[in-house]
Image (cartoon, rainbow, N blue to C red):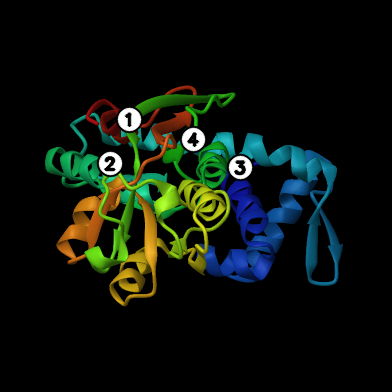
């Protein structure tokens, strides 16, 4: 068994087929198939049920996933540690973040990190909900995750570091679209057409509370692409509920922003697996 075989195995797991794995790895398809067969011979067990072109993990294959990821993470950590002996002069740092938290505080964190370590490439993977961020960290798809949750999360096997607390705001195309009071009571949003996030997000939870108490209010648009919210607002489609991380962007775009009267907040946290971090991740966490 060697690292290349484990890499090919995980590529098939992550991409669903030998063909897609080979394409992602930039190798010939027979190379992936041969590596899988050699790995199965070394382990003395079938890792996939083969039904035509479809591969389904066997129980043995399921059990191999986490150890295989640990081996590859260990190799990446070893390379990064050696490369950092003379300082962080290269490499990549992978971070998963929810959209609002990518606006703030993540953008500021990356700015400070990039100023100190300009040769390190930072890659941000999108995750719509806290569970998606957590899953990306757990499986090793990223080293660090930034999420916002209604309550500070307690996550087995992960280290959780609080960053800040964010409240919610209302964003509209003009002041005429919002009540004069500030903060705006949810019940005052009678008849409002709301632009909301998908279920499982904080902005959707707060919007649903508005619909329950404000007569005639309703969801006009549910949008999974957070970058589309401000254009929809400015086009007059409706009023958006967003975390306050969007305040400066919304004001700069010409929108009107008002505080919302709500007990709901987002606890923004940085999460990573327990154990040693790569030099880049360790520096990012320390310099936040």
Q: Are marks 4 and 1 in contact (CB under 8 Å)?
A: no
Q: CA distance from mark 4 to mark 2?
A: 17 Å
Residue 247 position within the rendered picture, expressed as x and y whole percent measured from the top left: 24, 51
Q: Are marks 1 and 3 in contact (CB under 8 Å)?
A: no
Q: Are marks 2 and 1 in contact (CB under 8 Å)?
A: yes
Determine whether the residue tagged by mark 4 lies in a helix, strand or loop: loop
Q: CA distance from mark 2 to mark 3?
A: 40 Å
Q: Earlier in the sequence, mark 1 or mark 3?
A: 3
Q: CA distance from mark 4 to mark 1?
A: 14 Å
> Is 37 in front, or is 112?
112
Quarter of the view holding residue 131: top right
Q: CA distance from mark 1 to mark 3?
A: 40 Å
Q: CA distance from mark 2 to mark 1?
A: 8 Å
Q: Earlier in the sequence, mark 4 or mark 1?
A: 4
Of labels 1 and 3, the one closer to you: 1
Of labels 4 and 2, the one closer to you: 4
Query: Is residue 136 rendered to the left or right of residue 251?
Result: right
> Is 180 in front, or is 253?
180
* Residue designated by label 1: 163
* Label 4 neighbour load within 10 Å: few <14, some 14-19, many 20+: some
Please name the residue shown 58% across and 49% down the image. Answer: 7
* Residue designated by label 3: 2
* Label 3 neighbour load within 10 Å: few <14, some 14-19, many 20+: few
* Residue designated by label 2: 105
Toward the left, the furthest residue is: 115
Q: CA distance from mark 3 to mark 4?
A: 43 Å
Q: Earlier in the sequence, mark 4 or mark 2?
A: 2
Quarter of the figure with the C terminus: top left
* Residue designated by label 4: 150
């Amino acid at each position: 068994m060697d690292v290349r075989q484990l890499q090919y195995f995980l590529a098939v797991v992550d991409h669903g087929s030998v063909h897609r794995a080979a394409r992602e790895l930039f190798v010939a398809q027979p190379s992936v198939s041969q590596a899988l067969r050699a790995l199965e011979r070394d382990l003395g067990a079938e890792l996939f049920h083969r039904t035509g072109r479809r591969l389904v993990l066997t129980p043995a294959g399921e059990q191999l996933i986490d150890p295989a990821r640990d081996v590859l993470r260990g190799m990446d950590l070893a390379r990064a540690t050696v490369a950092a002996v003379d300082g962080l002069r290269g490499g990549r740092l992978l971070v998963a973040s929810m959209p609002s938290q990518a606006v703030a505080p993540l953008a500021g964190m990356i700015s400070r990190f990039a100023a100190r370590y300009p040769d390190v490439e930072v890659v941000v993977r999108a995750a719509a909900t806290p569970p998606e961020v957590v899953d990306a960290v757990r499986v090793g798809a990223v080293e660090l995750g930034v999420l916002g949750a209604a309550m500070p999360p307690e996550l087995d096997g992960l280290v959780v570091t609080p960053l800040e607390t964010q409240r919610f705001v209302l964003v509209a195309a003009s002041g005429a679209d919002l009540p004069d009071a500030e903060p705006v009571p949810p019940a005052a949003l009678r008849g409002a057409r709301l632009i909301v996030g998908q279920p499982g997000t904080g902005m959707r939870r707060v919007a649903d509370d508005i619909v329950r108490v404000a007569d005639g209010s309703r969801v006009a648009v549910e949008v999974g692409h957070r970058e589309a919210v401000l254009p929809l607002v400015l086009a007059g489609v409706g009023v958006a509920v967003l975390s306050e991380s969007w305040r400066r962007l919304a004001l700069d775009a010409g929108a009107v922003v008002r505080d919302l009267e709500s007990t709901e907040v987002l606890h923004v946290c940085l999460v990573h697996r327990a154990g040693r971090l790569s030099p880049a991740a360790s520096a990012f966490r320390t310099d936040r």
